[in-house]
Amino acid sequence: MKRVLVTGMSGVGKSALLDELASRGHVTMDTDHGDFHELVDGERLWRRDRIGQRLPALSTSRPLR
């Protein structure tokens, strides 16, 4: 299974893209929701441990929202 990481500035359509992919049967995970970030030196960064914990579930589940 391929995994694609979608990033970009606010308002460019990342969530809309994830919604469209999910409507077509693809499994998606929106890291804007949930405890996927931490603040490090004033910068909002992904928590790789939290994202990594959820990745195995992507192969057998529906959208993780």
Image (spheres, helix red, strand yellow):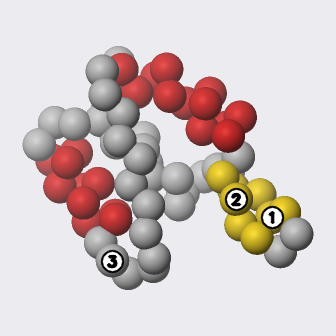
Residue at horizontal 35%, vertical 18%?
60
Tag of residue 48: none
Residue at horizontal 35%, vertical 41%?
4
Rendered-image quadrant of the N terminus: top left
59 sits left or right of 26 in the view: right
Residue at horizontal 22%, vertical 36%?
26
Residue at horizontal 34%, vertical 65%?
14
Q: Which residue is mark 1?
A: 39
Q: Is residue 46 above or below residue 2?
A: below
| Count of numbered badges drawn on the protein | 3
Q: Which residue is mark 3?
A: 12
- Please tell me which of labels 1 and 2 falls first in the chain: 1
Residue 6: percent from left, percent from top: 39, 55
Amino acid type, label 2: Leu
Q: Are marks 1 and 2 in contact (CB under 8 Å)?
A: yes
Q: Are marks 2 and 3 in contact (CB under 8 Å)?
A: no
Label 2 – label 3 distance at C-alpha = 19 Å
Residue 19: percent from left, percent from top: 25, 56
Residue 55: percent from left, percent from top: 50, 28
53 sits left or right of 47 in the view: left
Judged from the image, the secondary structure of the residue bearing numbered disc 1 is: strand
Q: Which residue is mark 2?
A: 45
